[in-house]
Amino acid sequence: MRAACLFAALSLGCGSELSRGPASDPAPSPAPVPEARSEPAPVKIAEPEPAPEPAEAAPEAVPEDRFKTAVAGGAEFPGAPPPVACGAAPTGMACVPAGPFVRGSDDGPDNTRPRARVWLQTFYMDVNEVTYAEYKACMKARKCPPSGPGYTDFNRPRQPINGVKWFDAAAYCAAQGKRLPSEAQWEKAARGPDGALYPWGDEPATCERAIIKDERGRSCGEKKLYDKPATGRPFEVGSRPAGHYGIFDMSGNSWEWVQDWYTRSYAECGADCAGVDPKGPCGGADTCKGLAKNPRKLVRGGSWYWDASYATAIHRRPHFADNQPFHHFGFRCAATPDDAAALAKSGV
């Protein structure tokens, strides 16, 4: 038997291996199921996600145009005159092109309501607040009434003039061939066409952006020289980055007189504060009998003395035109396209 088996083993393979038969052959391990190599899910070759379309990726181009291009009144403002393109701005001024802008607020102080769109013709605005040196030069030329600050350390040549009456401010602007800005012009120059809360956008006011009162004290903690140092003082004009249209200090530093008479809200003002080139109550006339006893004018922009809540582009502060009781208010001037053309002819 052994021999037979040996013979068989030589020819077939015998013994225990034979008795196990096919089962002992390393059972053809189930053909290695190719590791379900999670087939790189049809490697959707990560179809490069459609890059955000340029239209969405470049929103900056749109506002940029609105800051430079005059916009017609169209169907929204059918009574608007043809927009005047910005020409060469008079020295020290910036052009604010014609078009609509968002004025007021629905969630700000009561006197800022309601929020509405208003259309303005092109105008020019002083890049800086009128300075102490500029006002004093006008006085010296006998073109402006004597006026100025009541505090020490407010007489640096490039500080904004402070302590002037509304009448003084109006006289200075007229002497320069300009005028005080309407309240609507001031607000558009401060916030731009889209209703930003500040001259730089909607980020909060800080001492990096405006001269205001903060946790260090008035005028960003800068002390006034001599008496009452904690009162602080305005800084030299242009000490913080420019805002919309390249205009400085539209937030903080010094309150600024505007042309308009004051009403307790734009709603109360009605048609005189709406639509196309509004001039406020009585159309901005020098006298306004339609207002209550002791009518008041307006200052805008906040100052070194007050905190950030006053430094928005919507805040409205009424005060008497003769500046009584006395406050340290300043101003800047504006010009119409016709004013600008006349200034150009005179070489300004």
Image: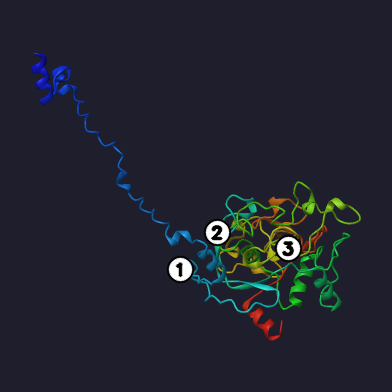
Which residue in the protein does label 3 denote?
256
Q: Cα distance, mark 3 to mark 1?
A: 34 Å
Q: Nearer the viewer, residue 84 or 223?
A: 223
Mark drawn on residue 337: none
Tell whether label 1 touches label 3 (CB within 8 Å): no
The amino acid sitting under disc 3 is Glu
- In the rendered image, residue 171, in percent from the top left (x then y), is placed at 77, 73
Count of numbered circles on the image: 3
At numbered mark 3, what does the secondary structure look like: helix, strand or loop?
Answer: strand
For residue 341, side relative to residue 157 (left or right): left
Which mark sits nearer the N-terminus, 1 or 2?
1
Disc 1 to disc 2, how far (Cα)?
A: 16 Å
Q: Is residue 192 above or below residue 348?
A: above
Q: Quadrant of the C terminus?
A: bottom right
Element type at mark 1: loop
Mark 1 residue type: Ala
Q: Is residue 290 visible?
A: yes
Quadrant location of residue 38?
Answer: top left
Which comes before the other along the chain, label 2 or label 3?
2
Disc 2 residue type? Answer: Ala
Badge 2 crowding class, 10 Å Cα cut-off, few under 14, some 14 to 19, many 20 or more, is some
Q: Indicate which disc residue 75 carries.
A: 1
Q: Position of residue 187 (x, y in %)?
A: 63, 62
Q: Nearer the viewer, mark 2 or mark 3?
A: 3
Q: What percent of the width, then of the height, locates residue 100? A: 54, 66
Residue visible at 68% across and 62% down?
241
For this orientation, the residue located farthest to the bottom is 345
The Cα–Cα distance between marks 2 and 3, rounded to whole angstroms, is: 23 Å
Residue 116: numbered disc? 2
Residue 104 spot, x, y in % from top left:
60, 57
Pointers 1 and 2 in contact (C-beta within 8 Å) = no
Picture residue at 74% right of the left edge, 54% below the top = 212
